[in-house]
Amino acid sequence: MQKRRFISVVLVVLTALFSSGCAEETVDARVARLHKKMFTIDTHNDFSMWLAHPDGDFGVKGGQVSFQQMQDGGLDAAFFAAYQDQGPIDPEFHRFAREYADTLILLLKQYAEQNSELGAVATSIKEMKALKKSGKVSLFLSIENACCLGDSLPLVQYYYDQGVRMIGLTHNGNNAIADAGTTKVKLHGGLSDFGRAAIAEMNRLGIVVDLSHASRDATLQATQVSKTPIIASHSCAFSVRELSRNLTDEEIVAIAEKGGVVHLALDAWLLRYGPNYSAASLDDFMNHLYYIIDLVGIDHVGVGSDFDGGGGVIGCKDMSEYHNLTKRLIEEGFSDEEIIKIWGANFLRVFEEVERYAEEQR
Ligand SMILES: [Zn+2]
């Protein structure tokens, strides 16, 4: 008995010491500890646009994305999109879109090679984890607007072989795959037959399906058609900011029920109303985050900055400032486990399922 009591006393003392130690951990120390331990993933940026056109005028800020900024902000991995503007649905445009996407993918690979001391292209969770271990960041390739597929199914395999691991079905125009959220006239009533076949092919190969920019019907249908969870790589909540680009409650619930994730954009236009929208800050981001967590829970939210394509808010204006977001989550009272989920564990769960399903098909 005495021995047991002694052990109990020791445990109480140790617990007290441990607790007081935790209480003394500063917010900055907790931010540093978390970023060292957890996997952090940002599912959308438009860096490739600036690589292709360094002097371009896109009406949005550039210079928010680089391997160095990822290192400075404690970000382990990001999906770098090969973005294409929508043109007419015809063979000539499809050829152009494919050549353009190929060029952007090539430029992203060259960027990674030229900055190999800081990071590299990754094509799997395994590769990403190995890169983190060696202190390097991961560049995952994605496509924003699958018009580069035209209406040719073998091109899904072609882009998989190029290293692409996520495909956003549309941008702001209807294409051969699906209707876009922002168009007045819809072509397919959601997904086309080719779009359904393309999703099946993406599932078979191991490519994450991204529904940001797609129409409501296309998103809801994709949650039915896809064999694996889907995501929205950079969208916010329509109920907080009414915009055709943002997701309705019905879409958010459907994505969550499928096991997917809504990656909230750090994009002022998507976050905030009014002429003063550019004053959007992490406060606005938190409003959308809380709304979606209240609706579907902590397991279905993530981060998709949209940096270099409209992203950037007060408090987190480029990739070097991600620590501020972690700091804010801590100050809001989120637990370590919850922060780890938001920053990457939720997406890893989806990606693991996508990889596992593809593996089973081989
Ligand atoms: Zn976008």
Image: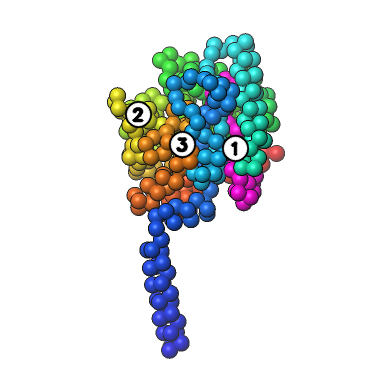
Give the foreground label among 3 and 1.
3
Mark closer to the chain start, 3 or 2: 2
How many other residues sit within 10 Å of disc 1, few (<14), some (14-19) or many (≥20)?
many
Q: Which residue is mark 1?
A: 139
Q: Which residue is mark 3?
A: 318
SS at circle 1: strand
Mark closer to the chain start, 3 or 1: 1
Q: Amino acid at mark 3?
A: Asp
SS at circle 3: loop
SS at circle 2: helix
How many other residues sit within 10 Å of disc 3, few (<14), some (14-19) or many (≥20)?
many
Please provide percent x and percent y for residue 242: 33, 27
Q: Which residue is mark 2?
A: 278
In three-dimensional space, the C-alpha distance between marks 2 and 1, rounded to whole angstroms, equals: 28 Å
The boundaries of the magenta stretch are 126-148
Q: Amino acid at mark 1?
A: Leu
